[in-house]
Amino acid sequence: MSGDLRGAGEFRLIDEIGARVGPPHAGVLLGIGDDAAVLAPSPHPTVVTCDTMVEGVHFRFDLTPPRLLGRKLLAVNLSDVAAMGARPTTALLMVSLRPDLPRDAWDGVRDGLLELAAEHGVALVGGDTTRTDGPVVLSVVLHGEARHPPLLRSGARVGDRVCVTGTVGDSAAGLRVLLDRPDLRGAHPEVVRRHLDPTPRIAAGAAAARGLASAAIDLSDGLVQDAGHVARLSGVALRIELGRVPASDALRAVIAALAPPDPLVLRVAGGEDYELLLTIPPDRDIPATLGGVPLTVVGEVVDGPPGEVTLVAPDGAALALQRKGWDHF
Ligand code: ADP
Ligand code: MG
C-alpha cells in the first residue's frame, strides 16, 4: 500500500496487526481483540520489562529501514529478558504514530517486530494504537518465564571473573559510520548490521542462569557504564582489562578507516551492543561459548569503592574515558 496513515483507521491498523500474529501460543488464553488479553498461569516466575524508542532520540527513519526498526524494538526488550536468564513469552506493543508517516514505514515496523517475535516464539497479545502530532513513539512490554532463579545485577562477589558474550563496540562503530561516514556504509556492512539489527542473547542468558553466573546485565548503554551498574548494586568494584575486551575484525577495520578521535569510547563505551556481561564465581569453569556465542573473560570483581569500574591498559595503567556511556539527561 502507498500513501501515509491519514485515513488508515485505528481499527483497521489493529486488525492488520491481529491478522499477522503467529499461531496460537500455549500460554495465551485470549490474544488481540478484546479489552484485555488473558494469559495462562505459568509454573515459573514471570519477568516483565519494557523499552521505548522515540523518533529523533533512538532512531531516524532516514537511517533505519523500518523492518529493522521493528526488529530492534523487540530485540532490546528480548535482551533485557536474556539478562535475567529468562525465556521470552508474550508481548504488548504500544505505538503513537503521526498521520504523515508513510504507510510503508509503519507496515515495515509492524512486520519486522512480528518477524522477530516469531523467531523467538513470542506471542503479541495486545497493545495500544494512538495518533501523535509529535515524533513517533514505539514501546514494547515483554514477559518472560524464569525457569531458573533470575540473574540479578546485585549478585557479583569479589573474586568472580567478569565475562562478556560476543564482541563489544560494533554497534557504536556502525552508528558512527551511519552518522559521520555514510559513504563507507557499503565497506563496513557488518558493524552497520550490528547497530540496526542486534541479536539478543537469549540462549546465553538462559545457560548462564543454569548455575553458572552470579550476576548479569545486558550491554545497552556501554560496557563500562553497564559494568558500573553491576558494581554499584553488588557493592563491589570491577577491574576490566582493555586488552581482553573482545573486538571484532570489523570494528578494528572501522577504527582504522575512520581514525576517530575517541577509539577507546567506541571500544568500551559506545552502547547498544546487546551482549551480556556476566560475573562467574571462581569455582566454576568458564565455557568457551555460551548459547552458541563466544564467552570472554575481560576482568575481575575486586574489593574497592562500591560501583567503581577501573579500565586498565595492557601495561597495567588505569585509563580514563571521555565518556563512560550513554545517558539521556
Ligand atoms: P480499548 O479502547 O478497550 O483499550 P483498543 O481499541 O485500544 O481497546 O484495542 C483493541 C484491541 O487491540 C485490544 O485487544 C488491544 O490490546 C489490541 N491492540 C491495540 N493496539 C495494538 C497494537 N499496537 N498492537 C497489538 N495489539 C493492539
Ligand atoms: Mg486501548
Image (cartoon, rainbow, N blue to C red):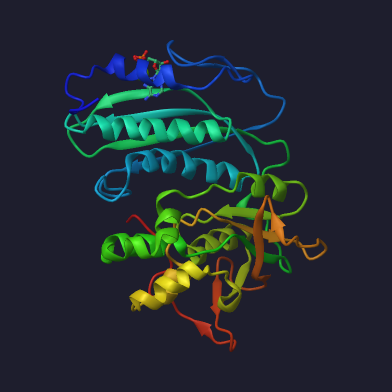
**Looking at the image, which is closer to me, 270 or 183?**
183
What residue lies at 21% left-to-right and 33% top-to-bottom? 102
Q: Where, by quadrant of the figure, is residue 68 drawn?
A: top left
The quarter of the rendered structure image containing the N terminus is top left
Judge left or right: residue 110 versus residue 1. right
Q: Where, by quadrant of the figure, is residue 8 drawn?
A: top left
**Looking at the image, which is closer to me, 116 or 44?**
116
Task: Reply above or below: 37 against 156.
Answer: above
What residue lies at 32% left-to-right and 24% top-to-bottom? 129
In the displayed orientation, state which residue is furthest to the front. Answer: 186
In the displayed orientation, state which residue is furthest to the top. Answer: 34
Task: Reply above or below: 312 against 279.
Answer: below
The image shows residue 209 at horizontal and vertical percentages of 71, 47
What residue lies at 40% left-to-right and 50% top-to-bottom? 196
Judge left or right: residue 284 versus residue 219. right
The image shows residue 45 at horizontal and vertical percentages of 67, 32
Judge left or right: residue 132 versus residue 326. left
In the displayed orientation, state which residue is furthest to the right. Answer: 283
Task: Reply above or below: 282 against 3.
Answer: below
The image shows residue 246 at horizontal and vertical percentages of 57, 69
The image shows residue 111 at horizontal and vertical percentages of 40, 31
Q: Where, by quadrant of the figure, is residue 270 drawn?
A: bottom left
Residue 268 appears in view: no
How many circles with numbers are drawn on the protein? 0
- Give the image quadrant in which the ligand numbered 1 is located: top left
